[in-house]
Image: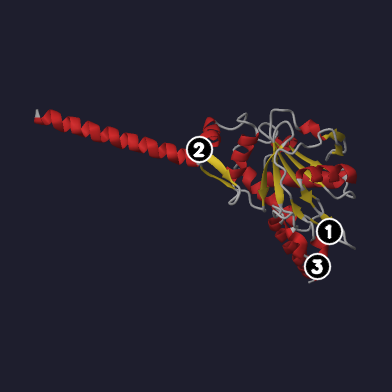
Amino acid sequence: MRRILKHLRILPLLAAAWLATGVAIARGDDGADPTAALPPALQGVGIDEYPNAKLPLDSHFTDDTGHDVPLGKFFNGKKPVVLQLGYFGCPKLCGLISHGLVDSTKVLGLKAGTDYEMIFLSVHPAETPTLASQAHDSFVHDIGRPEEAGGFHFLVGEQRATQDLADRVGFHFKKQPGTELIAHPAVIFICTPDGHVSRYLYGVDFPTRTLRLSLVEASDGKIGSTLDKIFVQYCYDYDAKSQSYKWAMRTMRTGGILTMLLLGSGIIWLIRIQSRARN
């Protein structure tokens, strides 16, 4: 019963944090902060999108093996990177995001470490490499592909470094007074191989096609199948409102033109056949 009551107490915090994720995606034209209507402890929590934001690749963190590593180690110019910000002690939201990634990654058709890298960076300055190691092992276990363990990286760092990275990508979080809880938005970042933000994906559920095409797009066609590259370049456009890839208008226009040409050709062919039959 005590466990149930403990989780019930954090539900309002999680709900408000999720609300902040939605309302803070874009600022109004007048510069007003739409999160101002939230409780004081949650005001300012959310996302400001900075497309093509440059990550601080020279910043140093500690990985899940206890080694000091520069962020640039994971950006080799060849593979895109999935970046998740949160903290290992998060009672619910981070776990939901990670489970969403696990479910999508299982059927992604791309291999971590070979086609892409995945980073979970804790924004909680008190968390340790031991917690990072435990989170790494749990994630790999849930994926069920130990051969890809080297493609998943769980990092901790000093507050200055983590805050700098969060600021650059527009990730606004806030520690709750008198607790170890941190309110933060539900979002992951798809980054280019050279360390720029390519796409923001929101929520805790990431459709496999959206995640896959986001990675193909971020890699500039360096990963994925030929069909993926055709879809990204010619057939699909990313729709920010639905947060998914949809058939591009240019594809429908091209299809309409081709359909008219085929119909026209068919009509001409039938007319010629009928004319020959009469003759």
Q: Is residue 50 above or below residue 186?
A: above
Q: Secondary structure at mark 1?
A: loop
User: Distance from label 1 to label 2 (Cα)?
Assistant: 43 Å
Residue under numbered circle 2: 235
- Residue 37: x percent and y percent? 75, 65
* Circle 3: residue type: Lys
- Residue 134: x percent and y percent? 81, 46
Question: Callout 1 environment at 10 Å: few (<14), some (14 to 19), or many (20+)?
Answer: some
The mark nearer the N terminus, 3 or 1, is 3
Question: Callout 3 environment at 10 Å: few (<14), some (14 to 19), or many (20+)?
Answer: few
Residue 110 left/right relative to 68 = left
- Residue 108: x percent and y percent? 60, 41
* Circle 2: residue type: Cys
User: Distance from label 3 to label 2 (Cα)?
Assistant: 48 Å
* Circle 1: residue type: Leu
Q: Secondary structure at mark 2?
A: helix
User: Distance from label 3 to label 1 (Cα)?
Assistant: 13 Å
Q: Nearer the viewer, residue 117 or 215?
A: 215
Residue 156 shows up from this direction: no
Residue 266 left/right relative to 259 = left
Quadrant that contains the C terminus: top left
Residue under numbered circle 1: 181
Q: Residue at the location (52% across, 36% down)?
A: 231
Q: Nearer the viewer, residue 259 or 136?
A: 259
The mark nearer the N terminus, 3 or 2, is 3
Circles 3 and 1 in contact, beta carbons < 8 Å? no
Q: Residue at the location (80% across, 53% down)?
A: 173
Question: Callout 2 environment at 10 Å: few (<14), some (14 to 19), or many (20+)?
Answer: some
Residue 114 left/right relative to 184 = left
Q: Which mark is residue 6?
A: 3
